[in-house]
Image (spheres, rainbow, N blue to C red):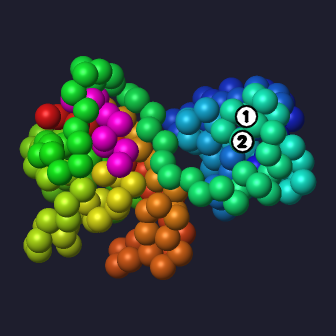
Amino acid sequence: MTRALFDFEARGQGELGFKANDIIEVFAQLESGWMYGCLNQQFGTFPTNYVQELAPTDKLPASFAAGSGQTVQQYMATPKTFHVATITPGDGATFPKHGATVDLHYSAYFLDGTEFDNSDATGTFTTPLRWKLGVIPPPPSVASHIALHCKAFAEALQTMSVSQRALITVYPEYAFGAQGRPGIPGNALLTFDVELAA
């Protein structure tokens, strides 16, 4: 966890802007000397010299709603699931339930932007994937659609309405944990660009 020392204006794609004194949750220190983190459900990179690391015993301010009043140590010990950041709103009325048949497009990425999975081999969001929400399909689909193994991915989709497009970010402990799985390293934070077509 860090506190912003100065304002930072996001100029490039994937950068995270903030104001002085904002509290930013950090997920990774990048080789470039920048960090990757989250502020108000927005994710991105920012320069290390614009922030100061908080001590485990520091209290989080009221402005940090997710952990207001907790110490950094208490907040970090609380399990985190996922964030959904809307790109395009849906109909706001039709929300799928577990077991419902949905049509969706998605691409899945690691923290460094590398794509590791998608719903359509062309990567163009032209042919939707039909899925019984929360049910892992039999082979050969299992091998090619890793996202469908992720419980938090299914839970996040239930918060979306038809026609909505969003970025779903899943914390490691609710993705594939410390053990990972073939093709997914342990403790990986995953991001899904998802459109719930129907």
Residue 45 in the image: state x and y as whole percent: 62, 44
Residue drawn 89% across the image and 48% down it:
58
In the image, 11: left or right of 121?
A: right
**Above or below, 95 relative to 97:** above
Q: Position of residue 116 (x, y in %)?
A: 34, 62
Residue 129 visible in the current orientation = no
Please indicate whether residue 36 sits to the left or right of residue 130 in the image. right
Are the residues flagged by discs 2 and 1 in contact, CB closer than 8 Å? yes
Question: Dot 2: within a 10 Å radius of its alpha carbon, few (fewer than 14), some, or many (20 or more) residues?
Answer: some
Residue 164, how many percent across, how many down?
28, 29
What residue sits 62% from the left and 42% below the top? 38
In the image, residue 85 above or below residue 77: above
**Label 2's element?**
helix
Locate residue 27, reporting x and y percent.
Answer: 64, 55
Determine crowd level at label 1: few under 14, some 14-19, many 20+ residues with C-alpha closer than 10 A: some
Identify residue for label 2. Answer: 67
Q: Amino acid at mark 2?
A: Gly
* Numbered circles on residues, count: 2
Task: Decide: is 149 above or below 100.
Answer: below
Is residue 156 located in the magenta-colored stretch of the structure? Answer: yes
Whether residue 92 is situated above or below residue 23 in the rendered picture: above
Relative horizontal placement of residue 86, taking residue 102 as reference (left or right): right
The magenta segment: 155-164
User: How far, Cα to Cα, is label 2 from label 1?
Assistant: 6 Å
The amino acid sitting under disc 1 is Phe
Question: Overall secondary structure of the magenta stretch?
Answer: loop
Numbered label attached to residue 64: 1
